Image (cartoon, helix red, strand yellow):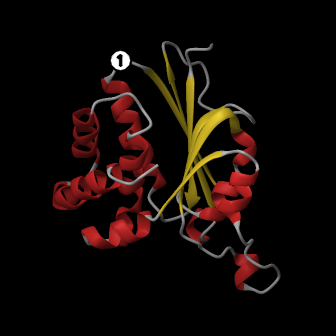
Amino acid sequence: MSDVKSVMIVGVGGQGSLLASRILGNVLLSQGFDVKMSEVHGMAQRGGSVVTYVKYGKKVYSPTVETGQADIIISFELLEGARYLSYLKKGGKVIINNQEIEPMPVITGAMEYPKEIPAKMKELGIDCSIVNALEVAKQVGSSKAVNVVLMGALSNTMEFDEQVWLDAVKQSVPEKFLEMNLKAFTMGRQLAL
């Protein structure tokens, strides 16, 4: 099973992680991989965790990613990135949007939002790239484009041609939002990882 790779996309409900997984899935399918995807929703509609597993390889038998198996974790939010670190395999890569979205216990005052998440990850020796995908998304015209900006960043860590990714964005995004999302992808691809 060494030919099977695993990507986890984690975030908060409403951030567009399902579109991101669709784009990634389309890229992988176009390259001839067997692809399995699975979505896990917490209280997504209330700002809870949303996790999507994407596994690909010559033959994939299960879509779920176990602890210590993820080659790459893409996180739409800082705390969600920290929450799923145990899934990262040794030598894996984490790409995190530096946005903070307060979960309910923080909103109600029961807990504080953890501080210094990126610094703590680096202390643990994790290959972690922190990007400001929200700022880039706003530059292209919509804070909702964070997902596609992060797919642009992810594309730099995978061996597939840029055109394959652009084609996948075209397949996955409605026509009226296509130009903005293509721009979001291109700007995300330019982020330093």
At x 77% / y 79%, what residue is drawn?
112
Residue that mark 1 sits on: 32
The picture places residue 103, in percent across and down from the top left corner, at 68, 73
The answer to which image quadrant residue 70 occupies is top right
- Between 101 and 17, the one lying in front of the other is 101
Name the outermost residue toward the right. 110
* Tag 1: amino acid: Gly
Q: Is residue 174 left or right of residue 188?
A: left
The picture places residue 176, in percent across and down from the top left corner, at 17, 61
Neighbourhood count class around disc 1 (C-alpha, 10 Å): few under 14, some 14–19, many 20 upward = few
Name the outermost residue toward the bottom. 109
The picture places residue 51, in percent across and down from the top left corner, at 60, 49
| Image vertical order of residue 160 relative to residue 42, above or below | above
SS for tag 1? loop
Q: How many marks?
A: 1
At x 52% / y 13%, what residue is drawn?
59
The picture places residue 31, in percent across and down from the top left corner, at 33, 22
The answer to which image quadrant residue 100 occupies is bottom right
Residue 131 appears in the picture as rendered: yes
Q: Is residue 1 left or right of residue 187?
A: right
| Image vertical order of residue 46 relative to residue 76, above or below | below
- Between 55 and 161, the one lying in front of the other is 161
The answer to which image quadrant residue 141 occupies is bottom left
- The quadrant the N terminus occupies is top right
Residue 43 appears in the picture as rendered: no
At x 33% / y 73%, what residue is drawn?
138
At x 42% / y 63%, what residue is drawn?
133
